[in-house]
């Protein structure tokens, strides 16, 4: 996905109008998901919506919008992914093509919000009156449907709300911060480093915690926050609710203390504890003696990773654990989106 920072950067370099292509509806098997975007100007493209014939058709339509229709500001392409596009995905996607210029008011607002690191979203409304884009900040009580916008901003996941009573009408909420999840990883050992290598390229933020500064690599990706502390429990106590956690320190006792602290918080979305079935049984027995019942202990995933991937190499473990985390996060987002769509949010 080409993020909003990339879009603003490219638009500001142009002296001419460009076209922003955004995936709206994406049903069935499609190359990319709702909210994926790319930019097309007179000679170049930036980003991708999945390649193939779908992207070729979209780029061609964008260039025609730029050169053949001065009055039109947008176009909605409805594309079944079948034989006519020489793509056998079998899904259906709608692409919103809209002209964009660095002098547009919403682009100016977007650039300022990114510079100020605001928690906000771009809300695009398409209706029979045309297209409208606005910037909405977190907890802006003057805006209708703010609870839905807030949830999208917090999840980092775009949401499409369609008006079933009107053709070609929808509202697309796209958070500025598109990190799909935040993970706290305790432990900078060989498995921890392998997990960072796998996850760092994804749209996520990771707090990487260890007391041993020498265990961290010299170069760390920008979405990884290195935290060197002798008291990792403080990180647990000061974390946001509904977080994802992986525990794999150099000390079983420290693993135990972090696990107990997370259970006391009782609001983690995922608690992954590295270890064997033997470690699980010993930890559960000790935790039970400290008053944690089966309902609390059921929140712990141990061993971690996808069950049928049993390799012991750090990279194999990392891929297995990353798969599990992505599965958990997708389940959380799917549940949240289902709830949002059933809130009856109105727009237009």
Image (cartoon, rainbow, N blue to C red):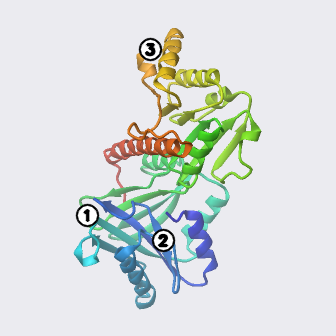
Q: Image quarter for residue 256? A: top right
**Is any atom of residue 72 visible in this view?**
no
Q: Residue at x 28, y 65 (%)?
A: 89
Q: Where residue 62 sits: x, y (%)?
A: 42, 81
Using residue 165 as the reference point, say whether residue 297 is left or right of it: right
The residue where tag 1 is placed is 166
Q: Nearer the viewer, residue 93 or 288?
A: 288
Label located before the other in sequence (1 or 3): 1
Quick check: marks 1 and 3 in contact, CB under 8 Å? Answer: no
Q: CA distance from mark 2 to mark 3?
A: 50 Å
Q: Secondary structure at mark 2?
A: strand
Q: Nearer the viewer, mark 2 or mark 3?
A: 3
- Residue wearing tag 2: 38
Q: Nearer the viewer, mark 2 or mark 1?
A: 2
Q: Which residue is mark 3?
A: 293
Residue furthest out toward the top: 289
Whether 203 is drawn above or below 132: the answer is above
Q: Are the residues flagged by discs 2 and 1 in contact, CB closer than 8 Å? A: no
Q: Secondary structure at mark 3?
A: loop
| Element under disc 1 | loop
At 31% from the left and 66% from the top, the residue drawn is 93
Instruction: Give x and y (percent) for residue 310.
Output: 44, 38
Q: Residues within 10 Å of mark 3 (few under 14, many from 20)?
A: few
């Amino acid at each position: 996905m080409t993020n909003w920072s990339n879009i603003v950067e490219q638009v500001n370099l142009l002296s001419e109008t460009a076209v922003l292509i955004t995936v709206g509806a994406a049903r069935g098997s499609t190359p990319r998901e709702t909210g994926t975007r790319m930019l097309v100007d007179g000679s170049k493209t930036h980003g991708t919506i999945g390649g193939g014939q779908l992207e070729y058709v979209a780029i061609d339509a964008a260039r025609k919008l730029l050169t053949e229709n001065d009055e039109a500001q947008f176009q909605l392409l409805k594309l079944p992914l079948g034989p006519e596009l020489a793509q056998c995905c079998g899904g259906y996607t709608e692409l919103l093509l809209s002209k964009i210029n660095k002098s547009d008011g919403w682009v100016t607002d977007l650039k300022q919000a990114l510079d100020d690191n605001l928690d906000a979203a771009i809300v695009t409304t398409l209706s029979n009156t045309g297209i409208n884009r606005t910037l909405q900040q977190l907890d802006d009580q003057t805006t209708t449907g703010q609870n839905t916008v807030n949830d999208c901003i917090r999840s980092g996941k775009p949401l499409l709300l369609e008006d079933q009573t009107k053709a070609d009408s929808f509202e697309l909420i796209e958070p500025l911060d598109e990190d799909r999840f935040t993970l706290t990883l305790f432990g900078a050992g060989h498995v921890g480093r392998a997990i960072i290598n796998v996850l760092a390229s994804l749209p996520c933020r990771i707090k990487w915690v260890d007391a041993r500064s020498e265990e961290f690599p010299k170069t760390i990706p920008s979405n990884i926050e290195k935290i060197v502390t002798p008291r990792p429990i403080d990180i647990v106590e000061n974390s946001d609710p509904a977080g994802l956690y992986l525990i794999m320190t150099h000390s079983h006792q420290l693993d135990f203390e972090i696990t107990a602290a997370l259970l006391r918080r009782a609001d983690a979305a995922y608690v992954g504890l590295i270890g064997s079935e033997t470690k699980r049984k010993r930890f559960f027995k000790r935790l039970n003696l400290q008053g944690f019942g089966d309902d609390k202990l059921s929140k712990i995933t141990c061993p971690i990773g996808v069950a049928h991937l049993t390799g012991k190499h750090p990279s194999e473990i990392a891929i297995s654990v990353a798969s599990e985390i992505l599965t958990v996060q997708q389940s959380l987002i799917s549940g949240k989106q289902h709830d949002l769509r059933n809130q009856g949010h109105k727009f237009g």
